[in-house]
Amino acid sequence: MLRESLVNRLDELFTKYGKKRESLLPILQELQDGYSYLGEEIINEVARAFNISQTEVFSVASFYHFLNIKPKGRYVIRLCRTISCELKGKEEVLRALESELGIKMGETTPDRKYTLDYANCMGMCDKGPAMMVNNDIYSGLTPSKAVDIVRSYK
Amino acid sequence: MARKIDVVFSDIELGKALKKVYEAKPEAVVETVKKSNLRGRGGAGFPTGLKWEMAAKINKFPKYFICNADEGEPGTFKDKLILEKQAPKVIEGMLIGAYAIGAEKGFIYLRGEYKYLYSSLQETIDKLKRDGFLGKNICGKKGFCFDLEIRLGSGAYVCGEETALIESLEGKRGEAKNKPPYPTEEGFLDKPTVVNNVETLAFVPHIIVNGADWFHQFGTEKSAGSKLFSVSGDCEKPGIYEFEFGITIRELLKEVGAAPDTKAVQIGGASGFCASSDDFDKPICFEGIPTGGSIIIFNKSRSMFKVLKNFVEFFQQESCGQCTPCREGCSRMLEGIEKFELGTGSSKTVSDLLSLSETMSLASKCGFGQSVPNSFRTIITKFRDEIISYRGENNE
């Protein structure tokens, strides 16, 4: 089942980006958007379609922080750990998020809804603390504002 | 006294520079940019005109022109604002560069963190295409074609380094390559390629319209023009500022409303330099304290140990891992610093780490590992006693 839908999806992506080595990264990015993480089955199918080794696909997928090779939550929360955000109260926001979600930094909730991670500078330094939830960026966080934002992701 | 000015965010009639460029030969365009002494605004400061000339001289086609929008240096957010407010001007800068070197294809490499800018940027590209600024026979100039695509990064700081960026565009791990050959000779798909920062490109149309001499009236003798600064940390007015090169740290602090008792300023982000009050009269420019524009201000309540540890953790996480001095160096440096927290650090630890940092700057393969020691050395030299006596929050 997964294989069939994957093969079709890859065909669509090849039409969009072209079947060439340079298209590997955008294709992996799109596959992750659809399948949430790049598991073994996806890596193998991509390798077959590109006619390159699985190791090569895996080495690319594992290089980039925003590509997941392991299951993550449906919503990945990335808190900025850069010093500018730290000066503005990142620790307090972290503690509030950990207590709201009942997990520690780096962990995923048991229902696989949320993952809490750090990210490096996301360019919100004048309005810290900042975090991303999947592709959305939030800045000027307070502990309660951060909790409200996380709760709004159903 | 260096002036506050407004070039990057001032409007300029779209196509005016391009029209002027099309009336001239590509060599003349390169010459104007060379004469302006425009240098890369991403941090490394390589002369832009020289880069274009190197690519223009190579007789291999196709050639590529890339806009580096992988702004990831901690404390930097200027390119984001430029792309929000002045994307057509940046693209015009790319078109001018493409004409100068003979490129017909380009990419904007946008960092994954800025994915929310993707759709508006794509709309700008589509509109420029409809208006005849992209595609075939641009502005009616026969035979001049340029196609532009956006590619997204995926959260890897090192991809801001131009050879790593090109590897990433080729669908590979973003690992830097040895130079030479330079990208201007063998870049994207081994073809001549120019990679320029967003801010650098935003200056190009102004230089073309107003001339190289106009650009020289700003800045210092060796650092022509102005620079955007991304200001954050302990000050009343954080944000984006444009100042002429040559502004002193003290002048800048006054403009942004920093407290008179400012303890330190980190200039150039994690890979930049830390200035203490003794340095505040030094000018910010290529011949003074160089920077890609990140300014982080620390007041007297801040622990410089925490600042240092934050930067070293950043490097340890972001090192691409391919060369030993950087991969192992970052990890050992972090271990060494943690000794101070544990109470087992001493003067000997400092000298060992300084020697390690020397090795890293000499032996690392790319600018990443070579610049790790910048912040380490400056912080540990200027705040040595504070670092050695730091005992962690729990032990205080």
Image: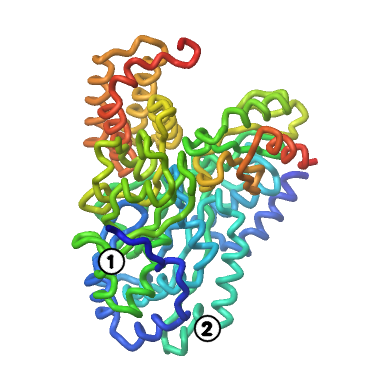
Up the image or down, A72 lies above or below B391; here it is below
Instruction: Give the quarter of the image for residue B354.
Output: top left
Q: Chain of mark 2?
A: B
Q: Residue at x 36, y 85 (%)?
A: B20
SS under mark 1: loop
Report which residue position mark 1 lands on.
B218
Q: Residues within 10 Å of mark 1 (few under 14, many from 20)?
A: some
Q: Chain of mark 1?
A: B
- The N terminus of chain B sits in image quarter: bottom left
- The C terminus of chain B sits in image quarter: top left
Q: Nearer the viewer, mark 1 or mark 2?
A: 1
Residue type at tag 1: Phe
Residue type at tag 2: Gly
The dot on residue B144 is none
Report which residue position mark 2 lands on.
B132
Cβ–Cβ under 8 Å for marks 1 and 2? no
Of mark 1 and mark 2, the one earlier in the sequence is 2
Q: Position of residue B216 (x, y in %)?
A: 24, 69
Up the image or down, B134 lies above or below A59; here it is below
